[in-house]
Amino acid sequence: MDAFDFIAVEVPDSVVASCLETATDCPYPQTSATVQGRLLNPTQAYYGASFDTLTNITLPAGSSWWILDAKDGFYKLFIACQARYLWVPAEAVSANFDPVWNGASLPDAGSPSD
């Protein structure tokens, strides 16, 4: 196949409509006012901004996450449209120094209330 050759595939309208519907159906959206942080170590996730809400989910060290909110010493993370938000202790997160983020400041999470 030459560099400019292509294969045309006809996709039924019903398939396109289904994909578009799924793509816009986001029960857990990412807000526009977000910044990225990077986990310093493997970190246990919480379902709320409290140490009383521990889950069995551990997020890997070095992974980057969108931070949606900050309170009571925790950051609220966007995981995916179809996944509930998770919270992690703010002390487990640092700025993301990738070229796009250049170490942008993270929001003040305050102190844990527990």
Image (cartoon, helix red, strand yellow):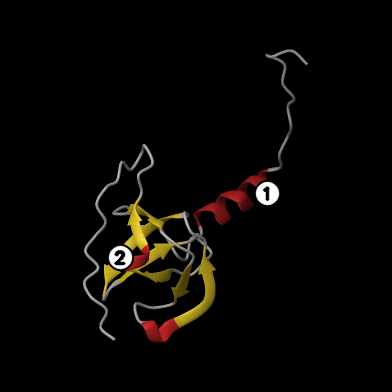
> How many labels sit on residues?
2
The quadrant of the picture occupied by the N terminus is top right
Mark 2, other Cα within 10 Å: few <14 / some 14–19 / many ≥20? many
Of callouts 1 and 2, the N-terminal one: 1
- Asked whether 104 or 92 is in front, the reply is 92
Residue drawn at (29%, 46%) of the image? 103
Q: Indicate the position of residue 100 as horizontal and vertical percent values.
A: 36, 39
Q: Secondary structure at mark 1?
A: helix
Q: Which residue is mark 2?
A: 69
Q: Nearer the viewer, residue 80 or 21?
A: 80
Q: Which residue is mark 1?
A: 14
Residue closest to the eye, 53 or 32 = 53
State the separation of the CA atoms marked 1 and 2: 38 Å
Q: Quadrant of the C terminus?
A: bottom left
Q: Secondary structure at mark 2?
A: strand
* Amino acid at the residue labelled 1: Ser
Is residue 22 depicted above or below 101 in this figure? Answer: below
Amino acid at the residue labelled 2: Asp
Q: Nearer the viewer, residue 2 or 107?
A: 107
* Mark in the foreground, 1 or 2: 2
Name the side, left or right, on which 28 lies relative to 106: right
Q: Residue at x 45, y 62 (%)?
A: 41
**Residue located 35% across and 81% down the image:** 50
In percent of width and height, residue 47 lies at 44, 77
